[in-house]
């Protein structure tokens, strides 16, 4: 069930950022924000699922009903990706509704599935339960491996409606979610099903509220209570108060944890956007394969850590407690972002940033018959002569001081100077074409189609320039283009050999020995930082995930009282939600350069790791014998039942207490 459900979820997320960029035409910051808003919602809704499971339906029925909502969300999302269904607004509306339903479904069942699996074991089966959570996590990543491999193929290699088939890429995960639901229902007779035990979360909130209120009223008269929750003893049983103390100890420990998830979940957003600007030529390695690499490494690392690394560390007489494992995982995640920072610094070297207000970008193509010198009035650009038919100098910033401005351009060829005037607008990029005619040297200003950072790198922009007096026909491979009189741009896929030569190039008809031939000049240097350089950061983040996430999942279950397993699982998942909120705030509000943002996240996680380690030193692990004593027949029965009735004869014991007494 978990394998199929995670295939469904990660398969959809594998192409979600690209769907925003290329299908809905959003920019990278909005795409990142919506991606993390969706991810955050998926981890806020577990609270709703925990409440439904513990107080109303139980874990088994909650998983079934919310899985149905999950399937409906996938179907709506798939319909929204069909181009013939409505306009862009309809696609956006259907996509958002689908994502909300998916978030309700996947988030609602998250705390129930892990806790329901843990319920199948008795308290004394500690090692077996630990193995279960490792296998459970491997199932998650097995589904993720296949989905991140298959779904991008369905999107890119299968064409539908004349373009990439996002409808199919979202539809297959919907089918897998149906399989997940069917498999889970089929195993119904094998499960141990714990019935709902009342509104546990509501009881917890009421007890905490009463303790705070009672302490505020009586703190001046009675200061003998050892813990602030003890002020609730006037109304609530001691066992419930003790359970809440156990949960609160863990929840306080969770406060620093969102920062880990703020880094981890950027694999699907910022790291994907980084990959789109890198060289993917080698054996068609793409960012989809690197996203799959995380899940694949999980399958490799889990048995390595469990069977080799942890036992070896134990032989060194080092006590590897769960909290120490989690702190080590934070360090590895911070190192992963250090590696991402180094990659980003090299990636941006060939990225042409847009011109700011009051400026434009300018470069010169020399198509004349000799070297030329170019002077633009009011600037000191292009000090050196520009050779003919050579790759032009890098784009230079031309100050305008106004939204638009006419500037005089002087071109010197073989001692003769020619004048031309051109109109420039701010925030644009221009190519100044210098070419020879019978009357002398001519200038033509062409607005350049730069590939900016939110365009995908498997596309190549090629400009065809014709300076001959007559129109020409251009054929690329088997594709013919209409007669070209001056200039136009085409976009080619990266697997086209013609387009693979450069990142952005200008191709022009040129008269040579009585024949018209094509000359290629590279406009923007191709980015040669290979996508394989992202592999170290994926290895580091995966090692951190094994130590942090799997350990935290089992820790959350083992440290919770029996009737609060789902509540504490939901609390653990909330740390993921707040991690995505952190990314959302930084992506939309900080406005930092990407490498600085990566460095900031890595530094913040190291600082948080220190705080978490200090907090962990003061944490006392729950003793299984203490839990057994708490739920034994004679624990607190006389004291709780008798004292409660003496103090509050009209207040009935809550459902949890009544059940414990009967048992």
Image: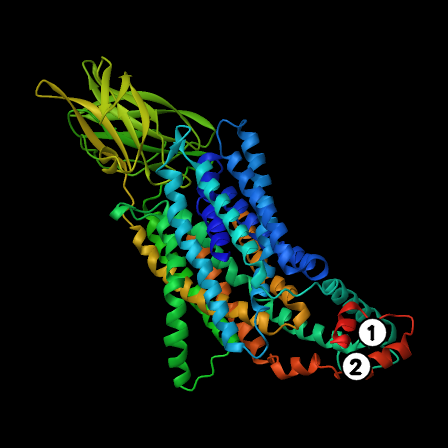
Residue 118 position within the rendered picture, expressed as x and y whole percent measured from the top left: 57, 68
Residue 163 position within the rendered picture, expressed as x and y whole percent measured from the top left: 39, 31
Residue 313 picture quarter: bottom left
Q: Are marks 2 and 1 in contact (CB under 8 Å)?
A: no
Residue 527 position within the rendered picture, expressed as x and y whole percent measured from the top left: 29, 45
Of all residues, the one furthest to the front in this rendering is 189
The circle drawn on residue 215 is: 1
Viewer can see residue 493: yes
Q: Is 556 positioned to the left or the right of 638 in the image? A: left
Colour style of the rendered protein structure: rainbow
Q: Is 283 positioned to the left or the right of 537 in the image? A: left
Residue 544, compared with residue 358, is above or below; it is below
Residue 238 picture quarter: bottom right
Q: Nearer the viewer, residue 77 or 2?
A: 2
Residue at the disc numbered 2: 637
Of all residues, the one furthest to the bottom in this rendering is 317
Q: Residues within 10 Å of mark 1 (few under 14, many from 20)?
A: many
Residue 355, compared with residue 194, is above or below; it is above
- Who's the residue at 59% across and 54% down the image? 107
Q: Residues within 10 Å of mark 2 (few under 14, many from 20)?
A: some
Which label's residue is closer to the chain start, 2 or 1? 1
Residue 397 position within the rendered picture, expressed as x and y whole percent measured from the top left: 37, 37
Give the mark toward the camera: 2 or 1: 2
Q: Nearer the viewer, residue 512 or 559?
A: 559
């Amino acid at each position: 069930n978990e394998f199929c459900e995670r295939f469904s979820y990660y398969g959809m997320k594998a192409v979600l950022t690209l769907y925003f960029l290329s299908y809905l035409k959003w920019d990278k910051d909005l795409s990142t924000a919506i991606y993390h808003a969706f991810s955050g919602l998926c981890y806020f809704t577990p609270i709703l699922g925990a409440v439904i499971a513990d107080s109303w339906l139980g874990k088994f029925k909650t998983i079934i009903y919310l899985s149905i909502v999950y399937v409906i969300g996938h179907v709506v999302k798939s319909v929204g990706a069909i181009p013939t269904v409505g306009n862009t607004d309809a696609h956006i509306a259907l996509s958002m509704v689908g994502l909300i339903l998916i978030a309700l479904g996947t988030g609602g069942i998250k705390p129930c599935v892990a806790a329901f699996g843990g319920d199948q074991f008795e308290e004394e089966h500690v090692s077996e339960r630990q193995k279960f959570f490792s296998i459970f996590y491997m199932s998650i990543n097995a589904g993720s491996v296949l989905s991140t491999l298959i779904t991008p193929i369905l999107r890119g290699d299968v064409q539908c409606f004349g373009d990439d088939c996002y409808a199919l890429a979202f539809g297959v995960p919907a089918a897998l979610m149906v399989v997940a639901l069917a498999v889970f229902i089929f195993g119904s007779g094998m499960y141990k099903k714990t019935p709902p035990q009342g509104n546990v979360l509501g009881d917890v909130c009421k007890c905490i509220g009463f303790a705070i209120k009672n302490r505020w009223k009586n703190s001046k008269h009675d200061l003998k209570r050892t813990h602030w929750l003890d002020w609730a003893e006037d109304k609530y049983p001691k066992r419930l108060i003790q359970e809440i103390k156990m949960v609160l100890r863990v929840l306080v420990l969770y406060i620093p944890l969102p920062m880990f998830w703020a880094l981890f979940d950027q694999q699907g957003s910022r790291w994907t956007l980084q990959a789109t600007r890198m060289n993917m030529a080698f054996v068609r390695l793409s960012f989809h394969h690197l996203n799959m690499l995380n899940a694949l490494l999980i399958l490799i690392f889990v048995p390595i850590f469990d069977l080799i690394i942890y036992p070896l560390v134990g032989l060194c007489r080092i006590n590897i407690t769960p909290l120490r494992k989690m702190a080590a995982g934070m360090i590895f995640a911070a190192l992963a972002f250090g590696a991402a920072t180094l990659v980003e610094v090299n990636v941006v070297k060939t990225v042409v940033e847009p011109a700011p207000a009051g400026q434009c970008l300018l470069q010169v193509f020399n198509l004349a018959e000799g070297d030329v010198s170019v002077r633009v009035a009011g600037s000191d650009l292009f000090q050196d002569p520009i050779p003919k038919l050579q790759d032009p100098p890098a784009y230079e910033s031309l100050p305008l001081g106004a939204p638009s401005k006419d500037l005089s351009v002087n071109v010197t060829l073989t001692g003769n100077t020619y004048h031309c005037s051109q109109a420039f607008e701010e925030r644009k990029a221009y190519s100044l074409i210098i070419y020879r005619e019978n009357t002398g040297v001519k200038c033509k200003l062409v607005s350049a189609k730069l590939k900016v950072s939110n365009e995908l790198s498997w596309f190549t922009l090629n400009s065809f320039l014709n300076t001959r007096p007559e129109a020409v026909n251009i054929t690329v491979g088997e594709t013919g283009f209409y007669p070209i009189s001056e200039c136009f741009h085409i976009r080619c896929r990266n697997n086209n050999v013609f387009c693979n030569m450069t990142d952005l190039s200008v191709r022009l008809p040129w008269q040579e020995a009585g024949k018209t031939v094509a000359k290629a000049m590279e406009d923007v240097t191709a980015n040669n930082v290979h996508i394989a350089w992202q592999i170290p950061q994926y290895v580091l983040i995966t090692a951190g995930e094994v130590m942090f996430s799997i350990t935290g999942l089992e820790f959350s279950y083992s440290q919770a009282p029996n009737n609060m397993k789902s509540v504490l699982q939901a609390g653990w998942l909330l740390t993921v939600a707040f991690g995505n909120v952190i990314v959302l705030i930084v992506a939309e509000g900080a406005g930092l350069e990407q490498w600085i943002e990566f460095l900031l996240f890595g530094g913040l996680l190291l600082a948080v790791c220190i705080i978490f380690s200090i907090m962990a030193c003061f944490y006392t692990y729950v003793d299984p014998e203490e839990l057994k004593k708490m739920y034994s027949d004679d624990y607190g029965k006389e004291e709780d039942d008798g004292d409660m009735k003496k103090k509050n004869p009209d207040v009935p014991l809550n459902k949890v207490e009544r059940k414990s007494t009967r048992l």
